């Protein structure tokens, strides 16, 4: 082969490689468009997305949105009914209920995200290890998962919270340590599915170590499933944290938190029901938003498993 032919050969190879890369980019783009198209067809998913976007905006701009200082008390306006000045009334020490609900959005999302981060870190790590190594390692990890699934979630979380003390972080740790099992199960299942692909067998055949296989092949492929689980686990995190807060564990007065507002408001439910109702509605709407969003993502990313 002369120099001209050799240059032509390598040039063709480079062009072919470039074409393959372009084809892969187009395929990824078309896949993303297909996922978005499926997601848009689910009206409840769009509603959920709208709720979550609204909550995020409220949490970020709370100081500018809230009509009053959520910590300021006014003994002359204790438990006032809803009015133009206080659209959701005032609480038992004269604080504006609407302002406390708005600032409570920050606390709720902050706690929910940290709980999911803690539980996701534990569950995904153990799921990756179980699915990758298999054998007795997989057996031990899955038996631990079964053990945690047998515990009453709220009672276990309550026990951990009491042991760690009051405050936000004991609740985050307690709930995160109990709801990681779903992350582990889904991650393990996805890894076992990806493990059957030929490129995984090729990577093992050329001597790729387990760590590289996990980081380069397993984790990127299962990331969409992890995102879906995280979105679906957020409502559970919010409900458990709100319940513990209602029981007096978690954010302490005067911090504006929805669980604490429901607890304080329930003491005056007969004569001032709005004190508990508005905070309860905030929890319900937030949980529904995450549920709708999670279901929509699941169906869009995996229409067969999602039932579409």
Image (tube, rainbow, N blue to C red):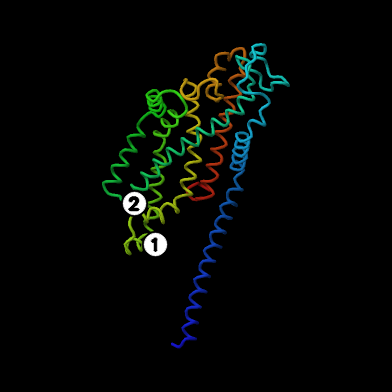
Residue 3 image point, x, y percent: 47, 86
Callout 2: SS: helix
Q: Residues within 10 Å of mark 2 (few under 14, many from 20)?
A: many
Residue 132 image label: 2
Residue 144 image point, x, y percent: 31, 38
Q: Is residue 279 left or right of residue 226?
A: right
Residue 199 image label: 1
Q: Is residue 95 left or right of residue 305?
A: right
As drawn, which residue projects farthest toward the left?
136
Q: Is residue 203 left or right of residue 108?
A: left
Residue 54 image point, x, y percent: 63, 37
Callout 1: SS: helix
In primary-sequence order, the first of circles 2 and 1 is 2
Residue 127 image point, x, y percent: 37, 45
Q: CA distance from mark 2 to mark 1?
A: 15 Å
Residue 117 image label: none
Compared with 20, 166 (above or below) is above
Q: Residues within 10 Å of mark 1 (few under 14, many from 20)?
A: few
Q: Residue at x 42, y 32 (%)?
A: 173
Please identify the quadrant where the N terminus is shown. Answer: bottom left
């Amino acid at each position: 082969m002369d120099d001209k032919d050799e240059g032509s050969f390598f040039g063709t190879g480079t062009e072919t490689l470039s074409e393959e890369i372009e084809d892969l980019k187009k395929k990824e783009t078309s896949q993303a468009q297909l996922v978005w198209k499926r997601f848009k067809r689910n009206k409840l998913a769009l509603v959920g997305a709208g709720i979550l976007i609204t909550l995020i905006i409220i949490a970020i701009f709370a100081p500018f949105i809230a009509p009053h200082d959520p910590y300021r008390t006014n003994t002359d306006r204790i438990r006032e009914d809803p009015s133009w000045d206080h659209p959701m009334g005032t609480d038992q020490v004269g604080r504006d209920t609407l302002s406390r609900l708005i600032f409570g959005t920050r606390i709720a999302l902050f706690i929910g995200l940290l709980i999911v981060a803690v539980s996701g870190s534990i569950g995904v790590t153990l799921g990756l290890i179980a699915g990758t190594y298999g054998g007795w390692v997989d057996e031990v990890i899955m038996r631990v998962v079964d053990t945690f699934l047998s515990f009453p979630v709220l009672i276990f979380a309550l026990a951990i919270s009491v042991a760690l003390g009051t405050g936000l972080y004991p609740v985050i740790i307690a709930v995160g340590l109990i709801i990681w099992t779903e992350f582990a199960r889904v991650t393990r299942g996805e890894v076992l599915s990806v493990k059957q692909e030929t490129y995984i067998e090729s990577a093992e055949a050329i001597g790729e170590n387990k760590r590289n296989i996990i980081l380069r092949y397993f984790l990127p492929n299962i990331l969409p499933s992890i995102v879906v689980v995280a979105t679906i686990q957020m409502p559970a995190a919010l409900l458990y944290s709100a319940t513990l807060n209602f029981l007096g564990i978690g954010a302490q007065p005067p911090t504006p938190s929805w669980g604490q507002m429901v607890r304080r408001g329930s003491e005056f439910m007969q004569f001032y029901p709005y004190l508990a109702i508005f905070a309860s509605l905030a929890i319900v709407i937030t949980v529904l938003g995450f549920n709708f969003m999670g279901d929509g993502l699941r169906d869009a990313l995996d229409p067969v498993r999602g039932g579409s």
